[in-house]
Amino acid sequence: MSKYNLTDFLKAFYEKVLVILQFCIISLHFVQFHFFTKKEILQVDFIFNLLGYLIIIIASFILLLAIKDLGSNLSPFPKPKDNGTLITRGIYSYVRHPMYYSLIGISFGIFLTRLTFYYLFLTICIIFIIKLKIYLEDQYLGKKYRNYSLYKNKVQY
C-alpha cells in the first residue's frame, strides 16, 4: 500500500470512527444507566425543564429544516457526496452546519431536563465530535467548491 493510499485509508477510517462515535453518543442519551443518571448537579425545577424542552423543540425543528434543505446531499459523513451540490439556501443561508448544531442543542436540552453528570458528559462528548466533523467538512467543502470560502465568510456559524 503506497503512502497516498494509506493516508486516504486512515482519513476514511477516522471519518467512519467519528460517525460511529456520534451515533453511539446520541444513542446513549436514550439509555438510562441508573448509577450514572442519578447523580444530579442541581435539582431539576420547572424553569430548567421548560428551557430544556424548548431548546429540544427548536433544535429538532432546525434539524428537520436542514434535512429538507439538504435533500439528496444528506450524508452522515463529513465528506460531501461526489454528485452533491453546495447548499446555501434555506436554513443554510443562516447557519453553515445546522444539523450539527441541532444535535448539540438537543443534547444540551436533554442535559437541562436531567441536570446529571452523565448527560453533561454526553453533551461535552458530542460537542467535541461535532467540532472535529465540522473541521473536516469545512476542509472537504473548501476543496470541492470554489465559492465555499465566500459562503463561509458570509455565514459564520
Image (cartoon, rainbow, N blue to C red):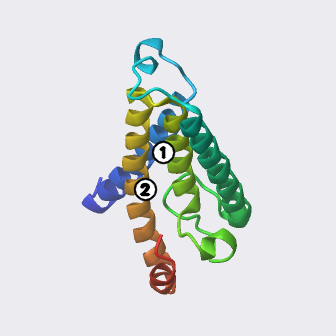
Q: Which residue is found at the position 38% from the left and 34% from the top?
A: 121
Q: Is residue 46 in view? A: yes
Amino acid type at image mark 2: Lys
Q: Which residue is found at the position 53% from the left and 64% from the top?
A: 97
Which residue is labeled 1 in the image?
19
Q: Work out whether mark 2 precedes mark 1 in sequence or the reverse, and give the earlier one.
A: 1
Q: Residue 108: where, in percent of width, then height?
A: 49, 43
Circle 2 packing at 10 Å, graded few (<14), some (14-19), many (20+), is many
Q: Residue 107: where, in percent of width, then height?
A: 52, 41
Circle 1 packing at 10 Å, graded few (<14), some (14-19), many (20+), is some
Which residue is labeled 2 in the image?
133
Nearer to the camera, 142 or 9? 142
C-alpha gap between disc 2 and disc 1: 8 Å
Locate residue 122 relative to residue 81 in the image: left or right. Answer: left
Image-quadrant location for residue 27: top right
Answer whether labels 2 and 1 touch (C-beta < 8 Å): yes
What SS does tag 1 mark?
A: helix
What SS does tag 2 mark?
A: helix
Q: Is residue 153 above or below residue 104?
A: below
Q: Is residue 49 above or below residue 34?
A: below
